[in-house]
Every structure is written in structure tokens, then in C-alpha cells.
Amino acid sequence: MTAPKFDLKSAAQKRWDVVVVGAGNAALCAALSARESGADVVMIEAAKPDQRGGNSRFTDGAIRLAHDGLPDLRSLIPNLTDEEAARIDLEPYPIEAFVNDMMRMSGGRTKENLAIRLAEQSTDTVRWMLSQGVEFELIFDNQAVREEGRYQFWGGLVLRSVGRGVGLTDRLFARAKHLDIPIVYGNAAVGLLREGPTITGVIVGPSQIQFDCGAVVLACGGFEANPELRSMHLGSKWKNVIVRGTPYNTGGGLTMALEAGAVQSGDWTGCHSVAMDQEAPEFGDFAIGGDIFKKHSYPYGIVVNQNGQRFVDEGADFRNYTYARYGRALLEQPGGIAYQIFDQQVESLLRSEYFGKNSTGYESPSLQALANQLDIDQKAFLRTVTHYNQAVQNKAYVPHVLDGKGTKGLSPPKSNWALRIEQPPFRAFPVRCGITFTYGGVDVGEGGEVLDDGGAPIPGLFAAGEMVGGLFFNGYPGGSGLASGAVFGRISGLHAANKASQARNV
């Protein structure tokens, strides 16, 4: 991957309208939005060019948006043929459903005004991203089940960027280059300049070079890649977890904002964390990109710890609504390790990451032989499977709906998609916790402006992406992270450009 280079010192010699800190989805959307609004924009990125893209580069590219069904989505997926469309069953996902999912996943703690703004702006923002060169496709492989020649979509999540996270960021970078937005790589922003209450610039790099500007957008992630801050805010067990994405999201933006008078918002003790392959690297692999180490088909099987015991309701809800909190459950297990168990009945439903060359897994013709390969209490494991099989209720199995085919008298229960594990070959995949991003952020206003402890905007300071606090608590609707980054990035960029324009005209 190549990227345009821009000299740090020469970039600092001029006054910019808007400085955007970060270079992931949210930062790129902010920069593009500000540039389209007439602002002279520069981006400051801690990573080197071959490690750019932030956490966005390691996503599956799925983006949640409100829509009225397939006819409404056709304009976003121009490559979908009429023949393909005729075989698709896809329910509308109205704004109200999006907002309700946000509120439901957080136990009602999400700031409703943010959820409404996210849902209301989601579709228009995706259309805007399309105009920036991002391409989209339906998620046939992971969000649909094929039955009798038809695709049944489920879980409110239907669209992703072509090329997944790599394709998304590459397209946005290409657009930034086309619009002559320079990017200063390999230098982290370390402080903010201010005159009285107004933010007037950014301090960059170990040499403390100053960038003067009319407005700053902080879109440089949470503190998920900072072991000390993870331990401080999430708990000591989080110090050594896998970081699913970039190593550069160390909380610097949050620190700068708080030092400037921002108020904390959201769940600083919570995070998005998932089941990852036991052998996943410490950080995301930039040479590969994408989201290849996750293991998200657990609703179709059972999950057991090293004591051979189940510990979550694998079928509590669609995967989209449980995967971001089940990583924490893994961390609480002995050794921080668990095994996802499947049989032949569901092999066709397993996601592609289970069969890639980077996947760690075991297969055996019997459960006993499978247990022999695992670091597990074998007797307890076999008892667990026996009790689970006995508890499975006879009911129709329908993987694209909450089918109610659960267990009876089992703790924890399996509420949906419970099939007896009885048809060989049997498979086991060892998993552990991987952190995606932290939920704690700063409070923002309707225009993305960062707010102080009195609820007033800090003049000249805006935030987007993971830095926006108050959206996510406990759970997380799949695809809402990229949606939030794009929506609030676009909003912050627009309002930062307006603020810079006002500053120029004073």
C-alpha cells in the first residue's frame, strides 16, 4: 500500500481551517465532509502509511442503516441484478427499530438524542459515502440463510463495504487524495493549543510542532490499545487481552479533550469485545487487514470452558446483538479460554473465518476423541453435552429467525437454535477475548462539538468515532460502530468547517 507523503514541518508553516486527528473511518469522513464544505484540511495520523486506517481497517465492513426494504437499498448496491433481487427476502429496518435496538442493547442507558441522530442520518450518510467512492454489497455470506433457493436476511444488518474494512478505508483514502487533503503520517498529536476558552490548534510529535487552525476534530479512537488504561478503567484482567485492531488507539485524543475541559461520557468501564481465535496475534495484522480471527458462529453450537461447562446462553439473541459482550464472558473463564463446539448439522452455517488458513480448530469422529485433543475436563465436557442434548426441545429449527427452539431445565439455557450435538464429525474451536474498542468517551453536542462539564461547547473542538461517549453500554448492535463513525464524522467535519469559516471572517 502506498500513500502520499507530507512533510511535518512544511505542513505546520501554514494555518489550516480544520485539523483532523486520526485516519480511520470517522476521521476520513470528517476530513472529506470539511473539505467539501470549503475548508482547507490536514489530517494528523500516528501510524505510518503502511499501518493507516485505524480500527476500521480490521472490520468486516458491515454498516447498520435504517431502510424500507430491498427496493430502498437498490440504489446503494447498483451491482445487484434483478435476478438476484428476486430471490431475496429482506424486511424493512425503520428508524424506530434502529433506535430501539440501540436502547435495548444498552438497557436504556444510550443517550436517546444520539441514537435518534445516528439512525436518522444513517441512510443519507451511506449514500454520501457512496458518492465518495465507497462501494457496498449485501452480506449474503454472514447475514443471510439460503432456503429453497431464497436468501433470508436476519438481524437488521444487511450491508457492508466491498472489500470489507480494507476496501472501505482504501476508497476513503483515495477520495482524500483526490480532494488534495494532505496526511501527516508517523506523528501523534500530543496536545491542543488554546487562546482563552477557544481551541486554536494541535501540538504534534515529539518535537512539539504546532499546527494553527480554526477547528480541531479528534477522531483517533479510544484507549483499547493502552494496557495501563484498560487495567485502570476496565479491570486488571483486561491488561493482556488481544487487541483486535490498531496498536495506535492509546487514548491520546481522550486525554487531550479532557485536559481541554471536556466531560467524560458513556461507559468508561465497558468495551466492545469478541471471541477471537486462540492463536490470533497481539494486534491486528496490517499485512492482511480485515476481520479474519473472529469466531462468531457460536449461536449454532455450544461454548464450554476448560472445566467442560457452558457459561452463556449462546442463542439468547441474534449474533449481531450478543457478540460484542460475550468477549467479556470469555475473559472470566479459567485461563481465559473456551471452546466453541459444533456438529455436522450446522457446518454449512459456519462463517468463512472458521475454514481459513489462520483458523485454529479440531475435528474428530466422536466426542470422546474430540475431548482428547482439548485442554479440558473431559468427563465434565461429555456430561455437559449429554445434559444439553437431553434438554433440547423438539421444535422447528429456523436459523434466520428467533425460533424459540431452546432447552428446558438447563442453566444457562439456550433460548434459540438448540440442536442436539450428535452428528459427526464434531468440531471444536478454541477462543479467547479480543477487545475491539472502548465505550468511554466525551460528551458531544448536535454538531459534534465537545462539551464541557456545564454542557457548553468548547469552541473549536469536535469529536467523532470511538471518542463519542454515550452511545454504547453493555451490548452493541452489529454494524453500528462504523455507522456512528461515518455519521458523526460527517457531522463534525461540516460543523468544524463552519466554525473555521467564522474564525476566518472575524
Image (cartoon, rainbow, N blue to C red):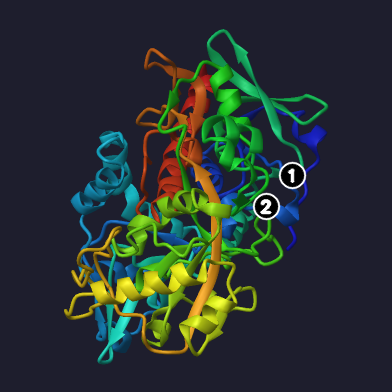
Residue found at the very far front of the displayed protein: 379
Secondary structure of the residue carrying tag 1 is loop
Q: Is residue 197 visible?
A: yes
User: Residue shown at 57%/68% (left/top)?
Assistant: 292
Q: Nearer the viewer, residue 318 or 61?
A: 318
Q: Which amino acid is tagged 2? A: Arg
What is the C-alpha distance between the residues marked 2 and 1? 8 Å
Name above or below for residue 310 compared with residue 188: below
Q: Nearer the viewer, residue 19 or 218?
A: 218
Q: Position of residue 431 (x, y in %)?
A: 54, 63
Q: Which amino acid is tagged 1? A: Tyr
Q: Position of residue 9 (x, y in %)?
A: 82, 32
Residue found at the very far top of the displayed protein: 196
Tell me which corner region of the image, top left, top right, bottom left or bottom right, holds residue 265. top left
Contact flag, marks 2 and 1 (Cβ < 8 Å): yes
Left or right: 460 with respect to 118? right
Residue that carries the numbered disc 2 in the rendered image:
52
Residue that carries the numbered disc 1 in the rendered image:
185
Q: Is residue 168 visible?
A: no
